[in-house]
Image: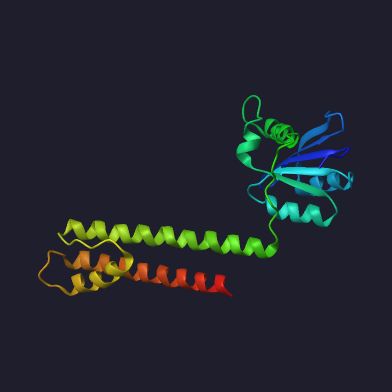
C-alpha cells in the first residue's frame, strides 16, 4: 500500500486524531478533529492510503473510505501498540499506527462487508445472552445451596431440577427463597428463548 500520502487515524466516538504523512514520512498535520472535519481532510487526499487500528468503528469507516476510492489498512491493535513511543495518548497512538504501517510484513485485518458485520454482531449479541444465562444459572445454584438444595451442572438438568425443588415441601426453602428462585428461573428461561431466537436468525 505504498503511496505518496499516508493518513493514520486514531478512532474515537466523537473526536478523532488524524495524522497526514508525506512520502518522506514527515507529518503534515497531527491533530484532533470531528468526524465532519476528518472527512473533509481525507477528501483533500484522494490517492492517500488510510490506516486505522482494527477496533471499535474501524470497519464502518473502512467501508466508507473504500467506497470513496481510498486504500485502507486495518492494523491489529496489539501490533500498533508495539510501536508506541512514550505514554499512551491520541497523538502517540496515531504515530504508532503509522510506524506499524511501514512494516513490510504487516498483515492487515480483512475489512468486513455489511453481511459479515451482521454475522459478527449476532455472534456478539448471542455471547452476551450466553454470559447472562450462565450468571443466572450460577445464582440459582448458589441460592439453592444456601437452603441445602444442590442443583446439578448443566442448563438442561437445572431447568428440570429447579421446578421439582420448588414443589418439594420437605426441603428448607422458605417462601421468600422459593419466590426468588422462581423469578430467577423465569429469567433464565427468557434468556434461553432469546438465545434461540438469535441462533435462528443467524441461520437465515
Say which quadrant the C terminus sits in. bottom right
Q: Nearer the viewer, residue 102 or 25?
A: 102
- Colouring used for the render: rainbow
Image location (x, y in percent) of residue 198: 51, 70
Identify which residue is drawn at 71% across, 34% down: 100
Q: How many marks?
A: 0
Left or right of 199 on screen, residue 15: right
Left or right of 38 on screen, residue 145: left
Q: Is residue 196 above or below residue 109?
A: below
Left or right of 15 on screen, residue 45: right
Q: Quadrant location of residue 132?
A: bottom left
Q: Quadrant location of residue 143?
A: bottom left
Say which quadrant the N terminus sits in. top right
Q: Nearer the viewer, residue 87 or 13?
A: 87
Identify which residue is drawn at 75% across, 42% down: 51
Image location (x, y in percent) of residue 155: 33, 66
Identify which residue is drawn at 69% across, 63% down: 114
Image location (x, y in percent) of residue 188: 36, 67
Kindly give the residue lying farthest to the top in the view shown. Answer: 86
Q: Is residue 17 above or below residue 88?
A: below
Left or right of 133 on screen, residue 16: right
Q: Is residue 44 above or below residue 21?
A: below
Kindly give the residue lying farthest to the front in the view shown. Answer: 105
Amino acid at each position: 500500500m505504498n503511496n505518496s500520502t499516508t493518513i493514520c487515524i486514531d478512532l474515537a466516538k466523537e473526536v478523532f486524531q488524524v495524522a497526514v504523512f508525506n512520502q518522506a514520512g514527515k507529518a503534515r498535520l497531527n491533530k484532533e478533529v470531528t468526524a465532519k472535519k476528518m472527512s473533509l481532510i481525507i477528501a483533500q487526499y484522494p490517492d492517500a492510503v488510510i490506516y486505522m487500528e482494527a477496533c471499535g468503528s474501524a470497519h464502518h469507516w473502512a467501508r466508507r473510505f473504500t467506497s470513496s476510492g481510498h486504500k485502507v489498512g486495518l492494523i491489529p491493535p496489539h501490533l500498533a501498540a508495539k510501536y508506541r513511543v512514550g505514554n499512551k495518548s491520541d497523538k502517540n497512538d496515531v504515530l504508532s499506527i503509522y510506524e506499524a504501517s511501514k512494516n513490510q510484513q504487516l498483515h492487515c485485518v480483512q475489512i468486513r462487508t455489511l453481511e459479515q458485520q451482521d454475522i459478527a454482531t449476532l455472534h456478539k449479541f448471542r455471547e452476551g445472552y450466553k454470559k447472562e444465562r450462565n450468571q443466572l444459572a450460577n445464582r440459582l445454584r448458589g441460592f439453592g445451596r444456601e437452603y441445602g438444595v444442590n442443583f446439578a451442572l448443566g442448563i438442561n438438568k437445572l431447568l428440570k431440577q429447579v421446578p421439582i425443588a420448588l414443589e418439594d415441601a420437605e426441603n428448607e426453602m422458605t417462601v421468600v427463597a422459593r419466590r426468588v428462585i422462581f423469578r430467577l428461573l423465569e429469567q433464565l428461561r427468557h434468556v434461553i428463548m432469546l438465545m434461540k431466537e438469535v441462533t435462528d436468525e443467524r441461520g437465515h
